[in-house]
Structure formats: structure tokens, C-alpha cells
Amino acid sequence: MNDALFQRASQTAPGGVHSPVRAFKGVGGTPVFMASAEGAWLTDVEGRTYIDFCQSFGPLILGHRDPDVARVVHEAVDRGWTFGTCEPYSLALAEWIIGALPWVERVRFVSSGTEAVMSALRVARAATKRAHVLKFEGCYHGHADPLLVRAGSGLAGEAASDSAGVSADTISHTLVAPLDDERALDAIVDAHGQDLAAVIVEPVPANYGLLPQRREWLHHVAARAKDAGALFIMDEVITGFRLGREGAAGEFGLRPDLVCFGKVMGGGFPAAAYGGRADLMNLVAPAGPVYQAGTLSANPIGMCAGLATLEQMTERNGWKTLERRTADFVTALSREFANARLPLDVVAQASIFWIRRHSESPVRRPDRIPAGNAAWFAKFFHGALARGVYLPPSSYEVGFLSMAHDNGVLARAVTALAEAAADAERE
Ligand code: PMP
């Protein structure tokens, strides 16, 4: 049944999918069609269940179909699912975000992280009257043309990380610096600082595996952006409301000029946002001259689901719980790997984790990922899948825990993943 569905899908969508990583190209085999989900679990169309560490690539911090969120969503549907007018639901979420994060004085809701980043860059160019944008190698900021340069995520496995169809002049204003390298950054800023509209960073790069950065490096990036008169933009699409209530900015004590959100803030619906300093955000139409709009922007279902998610996480002190559970999970898994003498590392930050081949030194940039990692991961992934654990289907994607991953679920996952790793080593 699964194979037949994928065959049909391949006749209808490019590569059979609507977002590339779902096609299993990085791990081989036929993608599994999922029919339903609950909590930490996915159920496929043939009735098999899997512990889900993908969680739709991060939004579902409470797990699938959290009962509270489900109730709020049903109530929202009963009121009407899009108005295209002013409504109180996005207002409530905007006030919550602005109340929680002092560096967000104004916010604009959009429908995807890509749109949030694209719009934030437009604001930066308008505010500075400069054209260049500096990004870091291996950071992914969505698929807006100027940022499809050494990006990661679905692109990380490709021979050339630039996409076809992006003209040379579109990316001619994009500068790329390596992660974790103050001197390389300094050289670029010294040479191009006067033309820089923005420096954009994924504060915890999580689209090329998980590449946790040094706090000092992050502060150096922020400081160099400021010196140059460029905006410091934090892409918190993954880290926002995931690393903690205040995201990476709170975790590292950084003050972005503009920040981009997605994933968790929409509770699993297509909602995202950009926001920041009032003087900058007031450049956005209709307050100012930077045009940006969206038919379904601030969609009430996503707004209500997002707010319910954030309120519940706050009430339950969910971020602390998740951090503790993830740390225990990582410790248990690492112990299993060590006992079986498997040369693997489990890297984690808050409730984000990544399993990879062992490295003697910290892996903070793509070119330090151990050789052979992708080939190893393909075997490991299928071993895990066969044992009922669904990892994100690429060696470059990270795993996520949700509040629904309780100790029982995690203990089962540790056993399955340890067996899968031992098998992968034997092959
Ligand atoms: N920025 C980051 C850091 C992301 O991880 C992603 C998506 N994974 C995006 C931007 C783009 O978001 P979307 O897929 O919602 O367009």
C-alpha cells in the first residue's frame, strides 16, 4: 500500500513530495505515508506505529494533537477560519510575544519562516539603504532566492548547495562567512561593512545537523554587525520558543534588531513572524514604505494554536522539563553507545538533538562533520525505522523532543536506537 501511494505521489508532485527531505533521498528507500498521530507517536497507513522525533521538523513542542491545543483549534474553526480583517486572535498572540521578549516591540505575522526572513531582509535594506547581506555557511534561512547560498537542510546533501533558477545578480549581494571563525568574519566585515544591510544568523545552526556555537562567537557576530551599522537579525525559526521562552536571544543574552520566528509559535499551523525594534518595524506597510502582505497572514487557527502552545509551555514550565528529559535521554543513549563501543556522539541543545559519527573535537561547522556520516546515517535511520522510531529522514536534520515524549517513550527509544546503531555498525 505504501509503495503504491508513493508511486501515485510521484505522478502528481515533483519527486512525489511537497518538500524535498520527505522523499527519503538522503536515506534511500520509499518514504512512509503517515495516516495519523498522537502525542509522541505517528501511525502509518498500514497501522504501524513509530516514536516520532521529527515532530513535523520542530513545531510540535507539545507533541501531536495536544488536547488543549486541539480544543482551542476546534473552537477557532467554529468561529471561522479566515477573515481577512482585523481580529482579536493575532492581537492576543502579538501581545504575548511582545510581553515575553523585550527586543520585540512590534511584530508582523506571516505564513512561513521563508517569508519572515525575506521580509526582515527587506526591512534591513530599507532601514540602512544598503544592499549586502551576510550569512553563514551551513545556515538555512528558508528558500528566498538571495539566501539559497551554502544553505543546508534539504540542500545539504546536494553536490552544489546553490539552487538552479537563482540568477547570479540575485545572489550578488549575499556574502557568506564560515561559522565559528572570528577572523574570517572580521575580514569580510572590514572589506564590506559599509555596504552591509544585515548580518543574519541561525544562533544554533540546526539545518546542517546540529552545530552549537560558542557564546563568544555569537556575541562577536552581533558586535561586528553593530560596528558596521548593519542590522543583527536572529533567525529563530527553530530556536524561538524552543530553546526556552526567550529563545536563543534569551539563552545567550543577545539583543537582535530583528528576529524571525516560525515553527513553535504557530503550534503546528502555517504561521510565522518577524519583529523587533519599533523604529524598524514601523517601516513596514501601511505604517511605512516597505511593502509586505499576505492573504492568510495571522490566520486565526494558527494564532490560537500558537498562543495555546506558548501559554501551556509557560504554565507547565515546559522548557525546563524538556531540557531535563532531553539531557537524560542523551545520557542514556550515549551510555548505550559507549557500552557497545560504537563511535557515535549524541549532541543536544535544549530539546534539539543530533546523532552522528564520533568526532574528537566539537563540530561547529559543516566541513568538520565526520566523513561517512551520511552513509552511516542511512543505515542507522532504516534500523531505527524498522524498530518503530521515526527520525528526521536525513543525516543533516535534527531530532526534536516534545512534552509528549515521556520517560517510558524515551526508554523504548533508547533501546531501539542502540540496537539500530549496533546493527548499522555490523553491516
Ligand atoms: N529559518 C530556519 C532556521 C529554518 O529552520 C527554516 C525551516 N526549517 C526556515 C527559516 C524556513 O521556514 P519555512 O520552512 O517555514 O519556510
Image (cartoon, rainbow, N blue to C red):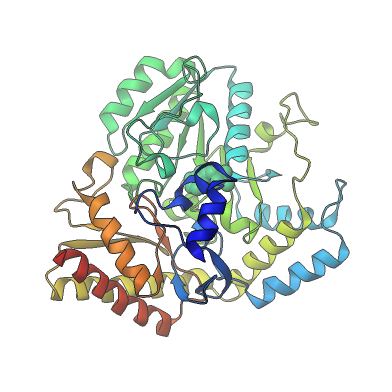
Residue farthest along the left direction in this orientation: 341
Residue farthest along the bottom direction in this orientation: 408
Camera-nearest residue between 375 and 202? 375
Taking the image as shown, residue 359 lies to the left or right of residue 193, namely: left
Inspect this view and state whether residue 260 appears. no
Indicate the position of residue 342 as horizontal and vertical percent values.
15, 67
Where 301 falls versus 19 (above or below)? below
Indicate the position of residue 393 as horizontal and vertical percent values.
40, 56
Indicate the position of residue 275 as horizontal and vertical percent values.
64, 42
Taking the image as shown, residue 35 lies to the left or right of residue 326, namely: right
At horizontal 84% and vertical 56% (from top left) the residue drawn is: 88
Taking the image as shown, residue 373 lies to the left or right of residue 110, namely: left
At horizontal 29% and vertical 56% (from top left) the residue drawn is: 378
Give the quarter of the figure containing the C terminus.
Answer: bottom left
Taking the image as shown, residue 289 lies to the left or right of residue 340, namely: right
Camera-nearest residue between 24 and 325? 24
The answer to which image quadrant residue 156 occupies is top left
Inspect this view and state whether residue 300 appears. yes
Camera-nearest residue between 32 and 114? 32
Where 49 falls versus 213 (above or below)? below
Camera-nearest residue between 95 and 142? 142
